Amino acid sequence: MANSSGVVRAGTEPIGRTGSFTVTPEAKLEWPGGSLLLSLFVGSRRMGRSYGFEHDGHLYQAPVGYYANRGVFDLAPGYERDKKPDFTRPIGLECLSCHATRTELEPGQLNRYRAIVHGIGCERCHGDASEHDGLIRPSKLAPRLRDSVCEQCHLAGSVRLERAGKRMRDFRPGQDVGQYIEVFVGATPAGVRVNGHSEALAASRCKQASGDRLWCGTCHDPHRITDFNAVCQTCHSKPHRTGDCTGCHMPKARANDGGHAVFTDHSIGGKRDAGSALRSYFGRKPLPRDLGLAYVELATRSRDATLIEKAWPLLRGAPQRGDPPLLNALAAILAADGRREQAAAALRMSIEADPVQPDALRRLSALVESPAEARSLRSKAERILPARLPSR
């Protein structure tokens, strides 16, 4: 965890090539059209590692990654199906939230950082170290609060989204992560997900039989190596065979959302509910706003217009003011239906609530009638996040 992100240093990274890309000993990414210097790594390299680079003070994703299980470079997660990988994908807070202890953006910026404290340090699980008397010991918390410490990064579900007026970056150990996010399970393709450990464990027969006694910390002690077989045998006192329990019951498989990496299946033989109706991981009745946004995200992935039909009445009836994700979703639906003025009005409300939205600014620029206003909106978006990097 301490090596989950950091500064790339020449001579310390793997070297190799994939397709037209080559990673050199100097930590340069080279291709026939140019080269750039890799400056940021994400991932401890136990399973793999992705990279970022800096342009004009902004951090962007590199289109290649290193896969430790195969010992090779290949296209990074999210780029696998791209015929021409781009260099314009920003590394925002959502990218670093689970790979860095703390981040601080420059005011009014999306991917330009004032400070990054790399790696996952003690405070992500135990609280602010400057307040020693208030340090948290996760294993002593109530089960929901205890599990939240791990779920802040290891819970993805079919859809994960921030609740209205909440920011996941404000979560602190000792709180219920469900206050900040809604996570929907169901309607998920069968298989392993990169950050789906918590919902997979919840689906396992072991968890269902053990209840709150079984949690992430039962097997994963961040301070020392755990004997997994010994943990299994605290319940299964008469194993049906000797050897590695996890090799059979928790096999590794390629993640269906994580490029070319393999991850451990934490469902331990449990039945997945792929294709079932969406429901809250936290066992509560989801708010119409959250369910509507979940349908929109699934519709975007699957290009299934029937999901938009389910989302529309849920979103239309939800409180809109001060809720950029809701307003942006409404704007997209209205624009697709040809209602440009209403879509533009929704985007204006969204930008008023959160001006640091380059995508919303560009979308609004395509809807307004005034060429001067359109240019102004694009200029604002460009200052937040350059739309194009210079040729290399």
Image: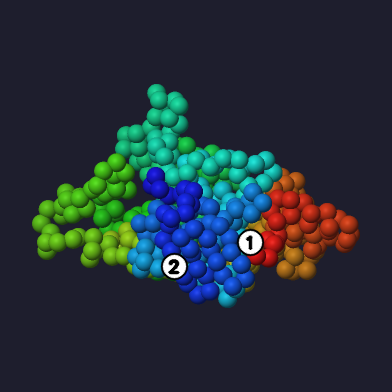
Disc 2 target residue: 16
Of discs 1 and 2, which sits in the foreground?
A: 2
Disc 1 target residue: 88
Q: Which amino acid does label 1 sit on?
A: Thr
Q: Residues within 10 Å of mark 1 (few under 14, many from 20)?
A: some
**Residue 292: horizontal and vertical position, in percent?**
60, 58
Image-based side of 350 in relation to 137, left or right: right
Instruction: Using the rendered view, name the quadrant where residue 248 is placed.
Output: bottom left
Which residue is at a point 61% across and 67% down the rendered structure image?
Answer: 34
Q: Do the residues labelled 1 and 2 touch (CB within 8 Å)?
A: no
Which structural element holds mark 2?
strand
**Residue 57: horizontal and vertical position, in percent?**
64, 49
**Residue 341: horizontal and vertical position, in percent?**
82, 60
Which residue is at a point 40% across and 64% down the rendered structure image?
Answer: 67
Which one is nearer the viewer's eye here, 343 or 99?
A: 99
Which one is nearer the viewer's eye here, 276 or 249?
A: 249
